[in-house]
Image (spheres, helix red, strand yellow):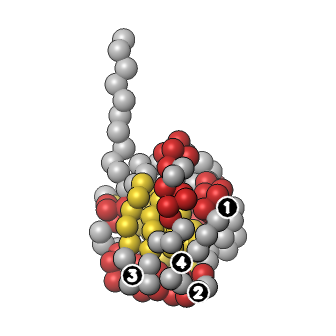
Amino acid sequence: MFTTEQEMSLLFEKFLKLNFGNTYIKECQGLFGVPDYVFYAKQNQELSIISFELKLKDWKRAAKQAFRYKSFSNIAYVVLSSKSANAALNNIELFEKYNIGLAKFDKESDFEILYKPELGTPYSENLNQKLLDSIGSSRKKSKNVETLFRPITIHETAI
């Protein structure tokens, strides 16, 4: 079990680099909240933004923060310590309703996605553009990003 969020964050950063590449910003300032990590990935000439909020406990607070991050992100995740993930999992319908990802992470760098959200459009075009401008024309490479979200489903309606 982690003793501090800082300890969790340091291990999570190593996990991000190893599994997804170094295309991230730690504690990105100047947006609607300060996510622990903002990960960006180019796919088909488009940039996808994935925000991560890490918490040892207090999944409700983390979910509120992650919802705010959807103003500039395509996806937002709450990442909880393995010990506190069950309380959030018992309320999975909230994560489904608001399309917020839920994952657990432990000291052995085991990362398990409990709810994988759909890729969405950020709520604020201005905040999203501000973040994209700060990333600029980075040549850093991401990998395995598709494992973090479900493809968008199109619901057909009867005419």
* Disc 2 residue type (three-letter): Thr
Residue tagged by mark 2? 3
At numbered mark 4, what does the secondary structure look like: helix, strand or loop?
strand
Q: Position of residue 52 (x, y in %)?
A: 53, 68
* Disc 3 residue type (three-letter): Ser
Residue 31 appears in the figure = no
Q: Which mark is residue 109?
A: 3
Labels 2 and 1: the sequence-earlier one: 2
At numbered mark 3, what does the secondary structure look like: helix, strand or loop?
loop
| Front residue (pair 159, 5) | 5
Residue tagged by mark 4? 25
Relative height, residue 115 to residue 112 (above, below): above
What separation in Å lies between label 3 and label 4 (alpha carbons)? 19 Å
In-image side of 38 versus 112 (left or right) = right
Residue tagged by mark 1? 61
Relative height, residue 78 to residue 15 (above, below): above
In the picture, the quarter occupied by the C terminus is top left
Point out the residue furthest to the top here.
159
In-image side of 77 versus 28 (left or right) = left
What separation in Å lies between label 2 and label 4 (alpha carbons)? 24 Å
Residue 34 appears in the figure = yes
What separation in Å lies between label 2 and label 1 (alpha carbons)? 19 Å
